[in-house]
Image (cartoon, rainbow, N blue to C red):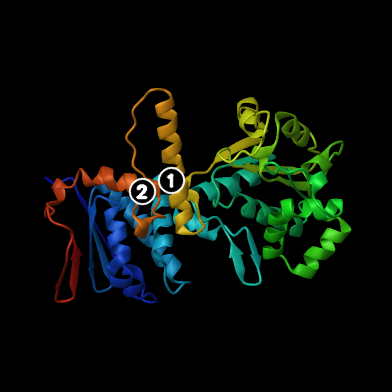
Amino acid sequence: MSDNQEVILTLPEAIDMASVVGEQDENLRLIEGAFNARITVRGNQVRLYGNPTDVTTLCTLFSDIFERLRHEPSLDLREIRRMIDVVHTGAFAPSELHDDIVLSYHGKTIRPKTTGQKRYVDSIRNNTITFGIGPAGTGKTYLAMAMAVSALKHKDVSRIVLTRPVVEAGENLGYLPGTLSEKVDPYIRPLYDALFDMTDPEEANGMLQTGVIEIAPLAFMRGRTLNDSFIVLDEAQNTTSEQMKMFLTRLGFGSKMVVNGDTTQIDLTRGSSGLVQVQHILQHVEGINFVKFNGSDVVRHSLVAAIVNAYDVYDKRHTASSKGVHMAVQPNTNEADADEDESVQQSTRSRSENTSSLKKAPSQSTIHEEAGHRSWK
């Protein structure tokens, strides 16, 4: 008696099966490689057969793919990978991310794209202070800005305060040419870029001139109490312990804080990072939450995910060697799939060890076409 399960899904009439399977069936190949199940397409039906847990997860995945394709002409491999990662975590359905619209501007919709980003925006909504900690390209600053602009538009706060420490290796602001504003501007330019990317330039400039939106170096926060404000501290890994304490105690009534940083990119020349220390001090304080991002949350160019992964491997190897422990770790060097989520790769390896019940051929996966019937594996 087989323990495998079979489910047949019928494609809605408004959707073309070609948009589901992808060009040269690349979507289905990617999906099947991540699960211990066989996927067969015949006409407008998708047959799933295999491990009951994986079949159930696949039902969720395909249902969300069908729903997305009602409103979008196609889904690329990067989007399919993200959806696979989301269903593998079990924390959310992909539709929960797609339906979570943080901000809309001139037809552009900002929403969380990964499980880590979804946890991040939910934490900002549900906590007074949220720390976002993780590598470059995970959307920490951009999503925090979008949440701040949304809160201002919905009149949840009366102003936005954006700040970051002015730290640059080997340079001193006093010796740079120009006024104080001209000296500081290059350091906080990324905050301006994010702001102008999601608001009308004239409206943004007006709010900057009237103080509704304030962008300033962290040192300018000292001695202030920020009431009814949405406050974002960026590049927090470059704060000292004293600066972090100073910033957090600026919190006033009706305000919300978001603190972002990457503890692998600390530029401080002396002293310890306040972002590293604060995780041990405030991790159990109610109303404060820490959200950790990883390589699977990177949403920039695919090479960014590969770079983050390679540095993680190097750091682990270096740490192990410094402790006298041999560690044979190989980074992901497949350039074609450089942005494939680590969680998907791990899941693929673990599931590939348990495929005998499906009676799959020992050779590579092939596609058979007979009278309009296509099967994988």
Residue 258, picture quadrant = top right
Q: Residue at x 40, y 63 (%)?
A: 65
Residue 190: numbered disc: none
Left or right of 273, for residue 249: right
User: Can you say whether 186 is above or below 314 in the image?
Assistant: below
Residue 208, percent from left and from top? 83, 59
Q: Name which residue type carries label 2.
A: Asn
Residue 309: numbered disc: 1
Q: Name which residue type carries label 1.
A: Asn
Residue 45, picture quadrant = bottom left
User: Can you say whether 249 is above or below 168 in the image?
Assistant: above
User: Can you say whether 110 is above or below 180 in the image?
Assistant: below
* Residue at image mark 2: 332
Which image quadrant: the N terminus? top left
Which image quadrant: the C terminus? bottom left
User: Can you say whether 60 is above or below 40 in the image?
Assistant: above
Numbered disc 2: secondary structure: loop
Numbered disc 1: secondary structure: helix
Q: Residue at x 72, y 51 (%)?
A: 187
* Lower sequence index among marks 2 and 1: 1
Q: Residue at x 39, y 66 (%)?
A: 66
Q: Are marks 2 and 1 in contact (CB under 8 Å)?
A: yes
Residue 122, percent from left and from top? 59, 47
